């Protein structure tokens, strides 16, 4: 329930003092030599993990069984982005030379291939799987019609492009986090601009819609997660500022919590925490932070547990906490 918007300092302090929960190492997945997992994506139902590996392969594992189901690649370029469809039946894969391939899950068969011309920083599939939002590096975000495989429109931000894109769960809206520090919200089917958020002074690296499609969460270089009104682009509130940059956001299916994956601005390799925010109270419910562990992905399991991945040498670790 999205109740009172008041952030109470005492509640926040108690969350930090008592909210940390011991993370459980759920699975350790062995990967081939040289196939270190660079980053991951969880399917929305939490039943698959896709990992972009250093050897150029995208590997797909079941969860929680951790069985390897498929391995596929972009052939001539490293993978730069991953995104599942809302129902988990498609996986969009973007590359450093502009290729985008969409694979069926779990079969791993190539369904569609597109060429954008630039490194693909972010991808998002519409809930009905007919549209794809693409954020090419230093270019305006693109809205593609997958049936005819062409760009419907280039989204307006022309200054250094977009850093993140996301469709709302109801399929009506598309949000982009642009390098000019503005969040833009569009009508998903037409690309018509609906609202803008100009209150953020630094770049946003991660955006996620609330599960009820009423709010947009944004986080980035300002080390803060902001909740934005979808209708007018106004920032309703900001969760307490942290010591690390926000790199990834995932709203829970029930809308009661938000996984925020942070990173150290000095080096992506340095350990950083993952916070589970209570979205009604605006306070930290629990914290994942393990010595020497650098998270490289996050999401939710079928039973509602927050999930975090990390990689070390020839293995991928999957942690869970509440």
Image (spheres, rainbow, N blue to C red):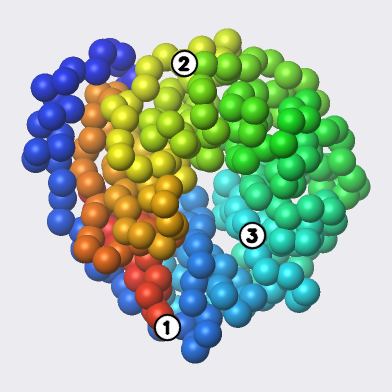
User: Do we see residue 314 in this rendering?
Assistant: yes
Q: List x then y, in percent, for residue 296.
A: 43, 59
Residue at the front extreme, as displayed? 266
Q: CA distance from mark 2 to mark 3?
A: 30 Å
Give the mark, 1 or 3, whose residue is nearer the N terminus. 3
Can you tell which quarter of the image residue 196 is in? Answer: top right
Tag of residue 80: 3
Residue drawn at the location 43% of the way across and 31% of the way down: 222
Q: Nearer the viewer, residue 50 or 288?
A: 288
In this rendering, the answer to whether 94 lies above or below 15 is below
Q: Is residue 117 left or right of residue 70?
A: right
In this picture, is 110 found above or below 155? below
Q: Are marks 1 and 2 in contact (CB under 8 Å)?
A: no
Instruction: Report the disc number at residue 314.
Output: 1
Q: Quick one: quadrant of the N terminus?
A: top left
Query: Quadrant of the rendered structure where residue 309 is?
Result: bottom left
What residue is at 68 percent from the left and 69 percent from the top?
78
- Residue 127 seen in the current view: no
Q: Label for residue 235? A: 2
- Left or right, 147 with respect to 277, comes to right
Among numbered discs 1 and 2, the one appearing first in the sequence = 2
How far is disc 1 from disc 2 in space, using C-alphas? 42 Å
Look at the picture and state if 235 lies above or below 263: above
Is disc 1 placed on a helix, strand or loop? loop
């Amino acid at each position: 329930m999205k109740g009172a918007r008041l952030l109470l300092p005492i509640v926040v302090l108690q969350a930090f003092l008592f909210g940390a929960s011991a993370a459980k190492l759920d699975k350790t997945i062995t990967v081939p030599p040289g196939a270190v997992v660079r980053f991951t994506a969880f399917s929305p139902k939490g039943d698959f993990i896709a990992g972009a590996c250093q050897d150029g392969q995208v590997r797909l594992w079941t969860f929680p069984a951790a069985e390897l189901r498929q391995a596929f690649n972009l052939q001539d370029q490293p993978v730069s982005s991953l995104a599942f469809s809302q129902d988990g039946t498609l996986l969009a894969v973007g590359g450093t030379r502009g290729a985008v391939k969409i694979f069926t899950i779990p079969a791993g068969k190539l369904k569609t291939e597109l060429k954008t011309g630039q490194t693909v920083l972010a991808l998002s599939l519409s809930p009905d799987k007919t549209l794809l939002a693409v954020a090419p590096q230093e270019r305006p975000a693109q809205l593609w019609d997958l049936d005819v495989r062409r760009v419907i429109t280039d989204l307006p931000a022309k200054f250094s492009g977009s850093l993140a894109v996301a469709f709302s769960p109801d399929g009506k809206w598309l949000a982009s986090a642009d390098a000019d520090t503005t969040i833009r919200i569009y009508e998903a089917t037409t690309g018509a601009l609906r609202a803008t958020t100009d209150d953020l002074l630094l770049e946003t690296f991660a955006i996620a819609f609330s599960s009820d499609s009423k709010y947009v969460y944004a986080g980035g270089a300002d080390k803060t997660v902001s909740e934005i009104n979808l209708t007018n682009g106004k920032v309703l509130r900001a969760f307490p500022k942290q010591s690390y940059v926000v790199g990834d956001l995932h709203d829970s299916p029930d809308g009661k919590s938000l996984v925020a994956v942070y990173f150290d601005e000095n080096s992506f390799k340095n350990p950083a925490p993952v916070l589970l925010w209570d979205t009604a109270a605006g306070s930290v419910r629990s914290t994942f932070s393990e010595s020497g562990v650098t998270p490289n992905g996050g999401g939710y399991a079928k039973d509602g547990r927050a999930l975090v991945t990390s990689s070390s040498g020839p293995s991928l670790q999957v942690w869970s906490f509440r």
